[in-house]
Image (cartoon, rainbow, N blue to C red):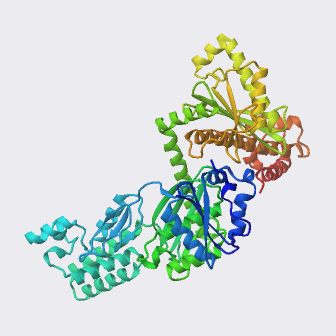
């Protein structure tokens, strides 16, 4: 395999101008596209120190056999060229966004003589206006059915439309007033197009003018004593109001904006977009991506904006770009990105991160949706039996195990400057979490991660040996439904690199246990370390085995940090009680016995604490004040 030095450009050959570069493999296929303010500075980073590069970048360079570039005048031109090349070449090392599901749109075929409104999925077609996307197709049909009363436009297929014209009789919708029946000539093509354009304007957010028009017509009909006509117009107004009620008002100033949020981990990320038009959420859409390169949140935002708005139809109103775009982080070059968006829109675009108010609240809501999307994606991926089996087999092959690790235990340590040291143990069987067998440990004789890992592994497997030697205890546990530590894992995973893996292996060796495999998973580079090995095991980024190990590690980290925060908060409150004048050990014990826990004590009022025997109102007030300070310290507020 060729190294990057084999195709490194000659010194001074790379220009210092802004531009776009392409890495190609031996077959000439483009595998990565990037842009730079200075091509020389950016490309030299790839060839300076190979060992210091991220493993994903190393994988790209070892796959490449050539690099070329194109000089442009401005950074905006670099953005445009980069996105057009990504779309043209589809490089495998660039971030790719894919829908987490196929979202339906309300589509209006304006290119036809008699435009039709319908539900449409998939690629967008030229000459068709789209509204949405919607979460469900039934939501589109429900909205469309409501609005056909006011805008009776065509919704039938080409076959039904042609057949009705041949027999001279409209379909059912034409008889009940939900279609103007252009198929039999009840309305001309010009008038039907005007009706369709009014429908599109209403869906685009111009709702007030139609409501005012109908209200004026209703009052006029009532003044002429045409009460049946006035009643029909009243019902039309209610139909419009019903359609509007289904779209939640989130911004009171009638803002048009797209709200974009991200949720990510080391391997994947989820993106959610809420489309807000006229202050109402008109639709939402989601993507899930695999991180095939080392990229920051700002970089993800830049890549997403380019791919998302670069794919919008130029024929759409303002090229489908709203006046305001809210993001969780500004891209690395916000000025160039804003200029690019303005050029595509043909008007001003405000790209910003909201910091307060309704827009900040809305961004947080979209962020929660992104987190839900990522969690659901991971759950679906983990619940697939074939995928889980593949993951376990890949771990077996990568670590050289005799059998697939059907039971995996992962350990993580959490502490704050060597204080309140705790550890967690999570259990995965057949690739699924067994939360009933999770355990947490208060570390007693260690102050750093290495000694803490050694202690927790020793304690866990000492209990395993003890329970296996005591048959009566094992039977009692089995009858009660908890096997405790009596069931050993096939694989022990520790959060850390070579030192942590060595500490876990040393603890097992000291206990005489030789049939349990050990590995460490380093968080920064996702490297798998085996005890006694000089170099880590590098598993492919697309590997289901690495995905499972990472999920196990992340769950152990979550469980450990939760226990650490609980313990730290409790210790802060207890230490606050130690400093209360007049509150000795006996009274502290009385208070804790009366309330049952420090949490309930901290939530008690002065009167409730003063009612405890031996605690007067004055001391109770002092205790409440001290607990308030202790809680404040514990939460960091």
Image location of residue 223, percent across then percent down: 26, 88
Which residue is at the far left? 167
Q: Using the rendered view, name the quadrant where residue 49 is placed.
A: bottom right
Q: Is residue 252 above or below residue 399?
A: below
Q: Specify whether 88 is left or right of 139.
A: right
Q: Specify whether 6 is left or right of 232.
A: right
Q: Is residue 318 above or below residue 123?
A: below
Please tell me which residue lies in front, 85 or 65.
Answer: 65
Please tell me which residue lies in front, 234 or 97.
Answer: 97
Which residue is at the far right? 581
| Whether residue 458 is visible | no
Q: Using the rendered view, name the quadrant where residue 353 is placed.
A: bottom right
- For the point 79% across and 21% down, the residue is 510
Q: Is residue 249 above or below residue 540?
A: below
Q: Quadrant of the C terminus?
A: bottom right
- For the point 56% across and 33% down, the residue is 392
Please tell me which residue lies in front, 29 or 342.
Answer: 29
Count how many numbered circles sit on residues in the image: 0
Q: Specify whether 21 is left or right of 566.
A: left
Image location of residue 247, percent across then percent down: 43, 67
Please tell me which residue lies in front, 418 or 629.
Answer: 418
Image location of residue 278, percent across then percent down: 47, 75
Image location of residue 24, percent across then percent down: 57, 59
Q: Is residue 122 above or below residue 475?
A: below
| Whether residue 391 is visible | yes
Q: Specify whether 41 is left or right of 186.
A: right
- For the point 35% across and 59% down, the residue is 137
Q: Using the rendered view, name the quadrant where residue 74 is placed.
A: bottom right
């Amino acid at each position: 395999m060729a190294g990057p030095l084999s195709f490194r450009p000659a010194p001074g050959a790379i220009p210092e101008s802004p531009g776009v570069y392409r890495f190609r493999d031996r077959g000439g296929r483009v595998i990565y596209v990037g842009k730079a303010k200075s091509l020389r500075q950016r490309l030299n980073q790839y060839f300076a120190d190979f060992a210091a590069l991220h493993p994903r970048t190393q994988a790209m360079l070892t796959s490449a056999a050539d690099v070329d570039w194109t000089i442009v005048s401005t950074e905006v031109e670099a953005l445009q060229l980069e996105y057009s090349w990504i779309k043209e070449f589809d490089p495998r090392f660039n971030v790719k966004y894919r829908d987490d599901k196929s979202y339906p749109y309300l589509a209006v075929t304006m290119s036809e003589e008699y435009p039709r409104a319908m539900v449409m999925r998939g690629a967008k077609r030229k000459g068709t206006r789209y509204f949405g996307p919607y979460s469900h197709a039934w939501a589109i049909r429900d909205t469309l059915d409501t609005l056909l009363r006011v805008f009776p436009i065509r919704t039938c297929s080409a076959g039904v439309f042609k057949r009705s014209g041949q027999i001279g009789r409209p379909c059912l919708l034409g008889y009940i007033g939900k279609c103007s029946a252009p198929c039999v000539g009840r309305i001309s093509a010009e008038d039907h197009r005007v009706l369709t354009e009014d429908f599109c304007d209403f869906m685009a957010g111009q709702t007030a003018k139609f409501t005012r028009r109908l209200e004026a017509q209703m009052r006029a009909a009532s003044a002429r004593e045409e009460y049946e006509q006035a009643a029909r117009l009243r019902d039309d107004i209610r139909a419009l109001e019903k359609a509007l009620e289904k779209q939640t008002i989130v911004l009171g100033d009638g803002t048009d904006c797209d709200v974009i949020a991200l949720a990510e981990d080391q391997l994947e990320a989820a993106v959610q977009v809420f489309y807000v038009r006229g202050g109402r959420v008109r639709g939402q859409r989601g993507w899930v991506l695999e991180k095939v390169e080392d990229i920051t949140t700002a970089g993800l935002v830049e890549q997403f904006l380019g791919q998302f708005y670069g794919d919008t139809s130029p024929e759409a109103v303002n090229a489908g770009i709203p006046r305001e775009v809210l993001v969780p982080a500004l891209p690395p070059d916000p000025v160039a990105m804003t200029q690019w968006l303005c050029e595509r829109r043909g008007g001003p675009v405000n790209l910003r991160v909201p910091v307060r108010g309704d827009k900040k609240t809305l961004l947080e809501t979209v962020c929660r949706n992104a987190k839900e999307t990522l969690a659901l994606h991971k759950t679906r991926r983990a619940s697939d039996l074939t995928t889980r089996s593949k993951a376990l087999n890949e771990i077996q092959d990568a670590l050289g195990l005799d059998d697939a690790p059907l039971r995996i235990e992962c350990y993580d340590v959490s502490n704050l400057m060597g204080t309140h040291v705790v550890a967690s143990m999570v259990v995965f069987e057949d690739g699924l979490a067994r939360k009933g067998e999770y355990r947490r440990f208060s570390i007693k004789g260690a102050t750093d991660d290495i000694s803490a890992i050694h202690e927790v592994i020793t304690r866990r497997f000492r209990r395993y040996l003890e329970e296996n030697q005591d048959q009566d205890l094992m039977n009692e546990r089995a009858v009660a439904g908890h096997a405790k530590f009596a069931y050993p894992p096939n694989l022990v995973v520790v959060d850390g690199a070579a030192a942590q893996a060595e500490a876990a292996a040393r603890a097992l060796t000291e206990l005489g246990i030789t049939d349990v495999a050990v590995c460490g998973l380093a968080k920064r580079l996702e490297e798998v370390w085996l005890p006694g090995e000089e170099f880590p095991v590098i598993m492919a980024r697309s590997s289901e085995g690495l995905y499972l190990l990472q999920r196990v590690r992340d769950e152990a980290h979550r469980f450990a940090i939760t226990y650490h925060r609980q313990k730290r908060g409790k210790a802060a409150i207890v230490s606050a009680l130690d400093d209360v004048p007049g509150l000795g050990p006996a009274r502290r014990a009385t208070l804790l016995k009366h309330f049952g826990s420090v949490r309930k004590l901290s939530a008690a009022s002065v009167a409730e604490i003063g009612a405890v025997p031996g605690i007067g109102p004055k001391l109770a007030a002092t205790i409440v004040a001290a607990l308030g300070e202790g809680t404040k310290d514990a939460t960091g507020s």
